[in-house]
Image: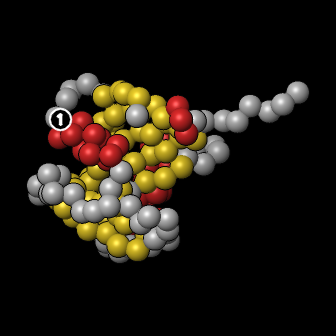
Amino acid sequence: MSETPGTTVVALTFIRQGNQILLVRQAYGAQYWSLPGGKMEPGESIEDAAIREVMEETGLKVRVTRVVGLYSKPAEDGLAITFEGDIVGGTLQAANEICECGYFPPDQLPQPVRAHLRERVADWRAQSASTVWRTQ
């Protein structure tokens, strides 16, 4: 019997400072700018994954405040979940696979970014009372 590959679940977090959002630049591949986040580990809750990934990539401790969106990524066998969070401690510094981090206006994102980030930022800016879900 062949083993079926599992779905990769990724937690990403919007962190606001004034009218800007925190983005991180990946130190690998095309070095895309992205929301801080990454893969959920076995035995970990999705909110714990979001908190851990923000800490690992930025040095910031956050509290998750709401779910912004659920994004099915069938071409990658993935599911991305975006949260919004508040900073509760730590000091901003790029770490691990991140070479740079900073705050940017949502309508002036740095380059390069993937198209799905623009869509997720638009969903976050809409501040809907409901969680967004879509296929990307």
Coordinates of residue 29 in the picture (x, y in percent): 49, 65
Coordinates of residue 47 in the picture (x, y in percent): 45, 43
The reply to whether residue 90 is visible in this rendering is no
Q: Is residue 65 left or right of residue 12?
A: left
- Residue that extends furthest to the right in the rendered view of this protein: 1
The reply to whether residue 81 is visible in this rendering is yes
Comparing 84 with 1, the one in front is 1
Quarter in which the N terminus is drawn: top right
Q: Is residue 40 above or below residue 4?
A: below
Coordinates of residue 106 in the picture (x, y in percent): 17, 52
Q: Residue at x 34, y 43 (%)?
A: 116
Quarter in which the C terminus is drawn: top left
Q: Residue at x 19, y 29 (%)?
A: 128
Q: Is residue 131 above or below residue 104?
A: above
Per the image, the residue denoted by label 1 is 127
Label 1 SS:
loop
Snapshot quadrant of residue 16:
bottom left
The kind of residue on which mark 1 rests is: Gln
What colouring method underlies this structural image? secondary structure
Count of labels in the image: 1
Q: Residue at x 34, y 34 (%)?
A: 69
Coordinates of residue 129 in the picture (x, y in percent): 21, 27
Q: Is residue 98 left or right of residue 2?
A: left
Q: Within 10 angstroms of label 1, few (less than 14), some, or many (20 or more) residues?
A: few
Q: Is residue 17 left or right of residue 27?
A: left
Q: Residue at x 26, y 68 (%)?
A: 102
